[in-house]
Amino acid sequence: MRFGLLAPCGGRFLSSPEPLAAYAQAAEEAGFESIWVFEHAVIPAEYASRYPYNEEGRISIDDDDIPDPLALLAFLAGVTSRLLLGTGVLILPQRSPVLCAKECATVDALSRGRLQLGIGVGWLAEEAAAVGTTFDDRGARTDEAIEAMRVLWRDPEATFHGRYTEFERAKCYPKPAQPGGVPIHVGGHSVAAARRAGRLGDGYFPIGLDLDQFAARVDTMRAAAGDAGRDAATVEITAGGGRGADRIRRYADLGVDRWLLSVWDTDPDRYRRAFDELATTLLGPLA
């Protein structure tokens, strides 16, 4: 089991260079494998969409800073040397796949191959409207975007003709530092996300599920991989939620490769103590 951190989102922390750099460097020193950040371009003050990960149906963010995730990871690449840099998740159908491919390749090149691209389809229809994209076809747009980005990362003169994206002999440089391109981890709680991960993902990142639901989604992912002629064992599984060793072992038995932990305290003395404790209780014994 490898252990990563979800970066704390509170107040101005994620846009404060010195405190954020110190947090990431301390995480790297403590032995964490990765750090993950998430995305919202905008959150309307009022929205009808239902947030799927709590009973209230509202995201628990007020006016906290949520920087662009790829720009944020580029900054973190510059202040660390070993941490993998993940998006958990980037809302892919709200972005141009051509521009997203360029941004991801740039971060991966400058970080010497440390980017992990977690993607999702999004849940907030009002946000999709604000950035000028449609919501009902976000699944189809995501599938196509994954394929288009991989063509741009792979081919010297990339050609792609899809429903939403077209380019002919497009030269897109730099290429990612990772030979196979940036790994794409498909996130989400739905059956559709599990199937997308099996068909197209380098990784699968189920979100907001209990153990039984999680096991069912993993089975769905593996079946979809088999139907697509892929080896499901090559799809890396990321999960998180809690610090109990027994709980983590149960998820490991289901095939989880990476467990994400939350240390939301941004006081240096307190988060360093938390990192040291986690290194002793989890990172060492369960690695």
Image: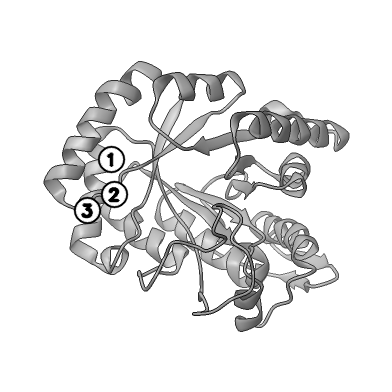
- Please tell me whether mark 1 or mark 2 is closer to you in this view: 1
Residue under label 2: 80
Measured in 3D between alpha carbons, the distance from the residue under mark 1 to the one under mark 2, in whole angstroms, is 7 Å
Residue 247 visible in this rendered orientation of the protein: yes
Residue 287 visible in this rendered orientation of the protein: no
Query: 116 or 177: nearer the eye?
Result: 116
Of the image marks 1 and 3, the number of the one nearer the N terminus: 1
Q: Amino acid at mark 1?
A: Glu
Query: 87 or 263: nearer the eye?
Result: 263
Quadrant in which the C terminus appears: top left
- Please tell me whether mark 1 or mark 3 is closer to you in this view: 3
Q: Is residue 273 left or right of residue 13?
A: left
Measured in 3D between alpha carbons, the distance from the residue under mark 3 to the one under mark 2, in whole angstroms, is 18 Å
Q: Is residue 105 above or below residue 230?
A: below
Residue drawn at point x = 62 percent, y = 69 percent: 124
Of the image marks 1 and 2, the number of the one nearer the N terminus: 1
Disc 1 vs disc 3: Cβ atoms closer than 8 Å?
no
Q: Is residue 283 left or right of residue 147?
A: left
Of the image marks 3 and 2, the number of the one nearer the N terminus: 2
Q: Position of residue 184 (x, y in %)?
A: 62, 48
Measured in 3D between alpha carbons, the distance from the residue under mark 1 to the one under mark 3, in whole angstroms, is 15 Å
Residue under label 3: 266
Q: Secondary structure at mark 3?
A: loop
Disc 1 vs disc 2: Cβ atoms closer than 8 Å?
yes
Q: Position of residue 133 (x, y in %)?
A: 69, 78
- Please tell me whether mark 3 or mark 2 is closer to you in this view: 3
Q: Secondary structure at mark 1?
A: helix
Query: 121 or 200: nearer the eye?
Result: 121
Residue drawn at point x = 51 percent, y = 74 percent: 43
Residue under label 1: 28
